[in-house]
Amino acid sequence: SHRKAALQLVQYVNKKARPMDVAHVVRAPWAEFALRDEDWVRWPLLCELASGASIPSPDSPPANGLELNQAKLAQCFKWLQEFNLAMHCLLPLVHFEAETSDTTMLFGQFKLSAMIGACRGLIFQVLKKGLWDDCLKRTQRSGVSLEMTLNRPKAMRHRAAGLVDTEARTTLFGQAFRQLNSSENHHFRRSDNVYYVKFLGENAEDAGGPYRETFAQYASELHSAQIPMMLRTANAAHNVGVGREKWVVNPSAFASVRLRRRMFTFLGKVMGASVRSKDFLALDLAGLLWKLVVNDGVSVDDLEGVDKMLVQSMSKMRSIDQVGVTEDMFEDIVLETFTTLSTDNRVVEIKPHGASIAVTFSTRVEFADLVEHFRLHEFDTVVRYVQEGLAKVLPLNLMSLFTATEFESMVCGCPEVDVDLLAQCTEYSSCAATDMHIVWFWSTLRKFSHEERSAFLRFVWGRSRLPHSVAEFPQWFKLQSFNKSPADTYLPVAHTCFFALELPSYTSEELLMKKLLYAIYNCQEIDADGDSVAANQLGWEE
């Protein structure tokens, strides 16, 4: 759609404008931002926005059409500049922020700020980041850091025994919660380390390294069964769709509702501290969760990033009449009631007394709508607890200016893809690491930016990040020659279920880079998982 293309144009401008100030970005000529020939493949929606046509193939890069495209993009950019210039004048006058200690003043309280939040994706990041940074400085606090002692051997023993920290006492995150949660909120509003940590029985002095290590270990624990705060997505369980490395919050974490609220509020405070200190907390949360956190609208597209099979099932339910199922046949085929299974495996009624109400041919659309609505909002209560924690540390209402992706990067930083680690976890078929096109492949991957490497991972594996070590890889990357000729006329083919790539034997590294970039940004449907013949030919086993 044109809206998605406009949002991508803003993302492109944000990337180019990082070294610029607001005054320059809202007045600069398009010539300073104009796409180069090699940029079009990375921003395919911009080609559609400019010309109504899809991005040309890598065999015929844009030439004569480029001038027309640039002229149309220049006009769109001018409209965005005018909009952002108006926002630059308006935003300082809008009462976005509540006092950071006031947890009752959450999103949606002010109509004007809500209207501005609805178009957050069209606001240049340099503009809103300046407003955000000024607010952080005004609410920043200093003073003596808190002190905390963590018992790592205790946490390791419980992890090795496969025990779950149901009382938040044995994991490092649980130990930190017990020692820090009752501290005054202003301690979390520092721009440097919130606390000084001592690891029991270890001689390390905390000059910053141990502090950063705690954030890494918190994330590791949260992304495990050690502490029951997060769950793998259904896409991860079924090995389908995107975001298979992602997690969602557990709606029924901990038996005590009071402890659940306190733990997720503490998580919000730690997330807020990571934003202020820039000691990132690398949480692999699904995009749906980040949208809920910043109070952005969620849709079935977001649900598909969590549970693709459910979305497909509900789509088939709505259109079941189109495959020949009549009203008379329906009750023999569909034996559903108005209940659904939650992420944490609870049977939930999606309307009053739903367990005793059968889904009929005439109510099937209502059923599908209610299932999707429940799954989109089953995390709302827990996310509210996280927001309460964030509100104690950050100007929460000002967060409505940021997209989910922008806020995720503020909390987690940019994911880095370690090419050397990936190479260690690679096996080859019908090719060798010394073959020239394979050598070029690894050289190309090392030349990619971190963003491009993440896009490559999504293309071949449905994930945007690698595991942290060789031992954590659930399956190895499979690299195979694509034995069709002439090789230069073919694109690489991915098999995400097998974490595999069929790579043609290109005749130059430059062509390999062009073909690979085109595939990862424009050919998400090139994934051959659905082709059982192709999968069998690969010779891999899950």
Image (cartoon, rainbow, N blue to C red):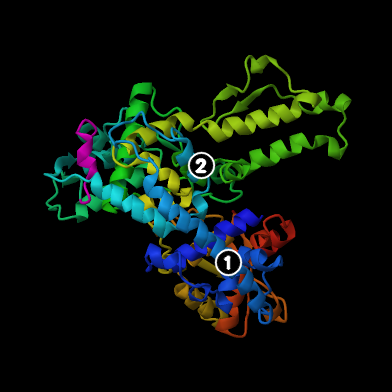
Q: Which residues are magenta?
A: 181-192
Magenta span contains residue 445: no
Taking 395 as reference, is 483 above or below it?
below
Q: Is residue 181 left or right of residue 439?
A: left
Residue 79 lies in quadrant = bottom right
User: Residue 449 at what x, y percent from top left?
Assistant: 45, 69
User: Residue 18 at what x, y percent from top left?
Assistant: 40, 66
Q: Is residue 542 left or right of residue 101?
A: right
Which residue is pictured at 62% across the width and 16% down the height?
352
Q: In the image shown, does 120 or 206 lie closer to the viewer?
A: 120
Which residue is pictured at 50% across the width and 62% down the height?
81
Q: In the image shown, does 344 or 293 lie closer to the viewer?
A: 293
Q: Name the mark on residue 43.
A: 1
Which residue is pictured at 62% across the width and 54% down the height?
3
Q: Secondary structure at mark 2?
A: helix
Q: Which residue is mark 2?
A: 115
Query: Rounded to the nearest whole Å, what is the CA distance between mark 2 and mark 1?
Result: 28 Å
Q: Residues within 10 Å of mark 2 (few under 14, many from 20)?
A: few
User: Residue 348 at what x, y percent from top left?
Assistant: 58, 23
Point out the tag, 2 or 1, that comes first from the N-terminus: 1
What's the amino acid at mark 1?
A: Trp
Q: Residue furthest bottom?
A: 507
Taking 46 as reference, is 228 above or below it?
above
What's the amino acid at mark 2?
A: Met
Observer able to see residue 477: no
